[in-house]
Amino acid sequence: MSATSAKPASIQSSGKRSLWVLGSNKILALILILALAKIAMLVLLYLLPPTLVTKSPIVAPASGGFSSLIVTLNNLWDAQNYVEIAHFGYPPYNVLLWPTRLYAFSPVYPALIFLGHYLTRLSYNESAFFVTNLLGFLFPLMVLKLFDFRTALLLEVFPTYLVYTTVGYSDALALIFLGLAFICFFKRRYFFAGLALGAAGLVLYDLFLAVLPFATYLLVFQKDRKALVYLKLLAPVLIAGASLLAAYKIATGNPFAFFSLERIFWGVKASNPIAQIQWTLSSKGAGSFLTRVYDLLGVKLTPTYWVVRNILFEAFLFGGIILLTQIDDPRKWLFVIYSLTLSVPLLFMVGYSVYSIPRLMLAAFPLFAGYSTMIRSERQLGIYVTICVVVSSWAILSYVYAFFA
């Protein structure tokens, strides 16, 4: 069995006619299920009166119809930063001013928002909604190619994927480049895999780390000693990274300005898991960001809530990685090393990014192949989908009326 084409035997589709695959058309099934899940989530958000959701609503998503809902979704949290960059570009650089925070965000996704606006004449908010959702429908099809239908389904209805491929965030674009990297790598097209990894890093800067497990897998598991192979894989990533540093040097005078901005505006710095929990519970300093007690459907979102929420998502993340080690697939060690490389650093930081861990863990998407081995029947799959849609509905309400990730 070739390491470049094998799929885990335990998660191969049986080929039987199934409710979940609509006969043999798995692509159509994935598109339809994701569309229905998104519609269910948005309809709930649209219909629920703000005063029913929270005692002190600061937004009214449906006050002006569906277009008002789209504007609201893309005027919150990081989504508004991407829209602002697409619309106005970057402001003059001055670390003493709040608008300078925008320099911590890549221009790649805002460029797509601008392009969508230019080609369709949609508003920038509408363009962000359109671009994000289009990309969100594409990535599960790449997971289908890499793994199977069940793994793709588990991913696409997962709460943070469902929410953050609906609102204007760049994660879907980054995931598409990561998926392309895997596909090209397993076809031994290492230069194109390197290009995709470099592109992913230019969308979300932390993803430059993703090249390390690919190089490690070549060296340790494929025992490839050809220098040209590593040059093809690494050169595009190094060029992309150098280009980013040069761009920061030109724009800000500091090639490492990203790290300074993360620290200044969001308090992000290296730490340890215990300190991360303490920071989240703290009522002083940067940790006070969510010590304000939000209420959502009668539930008070205390600091303890955010800690428990993170721990639950982290348990799911590392549980999936453990299950990955058990799948019958010669590629599994690349998936495991890759997932650990992008997951473990999430535990060793403090700062506002701590609250985004449930979203940031999406980069470790191969973990869903581990969970797909646990689901033995359509009934279990249906239970999983139902739970995910319910949690996603909570997540979208939290995103609009409080915070989520």
Image (cartoon, rainbow, N blue to C red):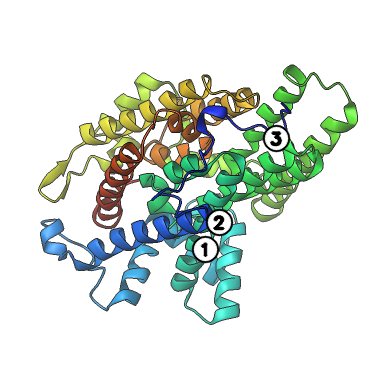
**Location of residue 45 in the rendering, given as x and y in whole percent from the top left corner:** 25, 62
Marks 1, 3: nearer the viewer: 3
Residue under the point 42% across and 52% down: 164
Residue that carries the numbered disc 3 in the rendered image:
5
- The residue at the point 56 percent across, 28 percent down is 9
Q: Position of residue 300 (x, y in %)?
A: 14, 43
Is 102 rendered above or below residue 382? Answer: below
What residue did someone put label 1 on?
134
- Residue at position x 23%, y 75% from top? 63
What's the CA distance linking mark 2 and mark 1? 7 Å
The amino acid pointed to by label 3 is Ser
Q: Residues within 10 Å of mark 2 (few under 14, many from 20)?
A: some
Mark 2: secondary structure: helix
Q: Nearer the viewer, residue 311 or 239?
A: 311
Q: Nearer the viewer, residue 294 or 379?
A: 379
Q: Are marks 2 and 1 in contact (CB under 8 Å)?
A: yes
Q: Residues within 10 Å of mark 3 (few under 14, many from 20)?
A: few
Q: Of residues 216 and 150, which is closer to you in this image? A: 150
Pair 3/2: label in front: 3
Tell me the distance, in whole angstroms, between the alpha carbons under discs 3 and 2: 21 Å
| Residue behind mark 2 | 138
Mark 3 or 2, nearer chain start? 3
Residues at circles 3 and 2 in contact by the CB criterion of under 8 Å = no
The residue under label 2 is which amino acid type? Leu
Q: Is residue 133 visible?
A: yes
- Circle 1 packing at 10 Å, graded few (<14), some (14-19), many (20+), is some
First in sequence: mark 1 vs mark 3? 3
**Quarter of image, res 356:** top left
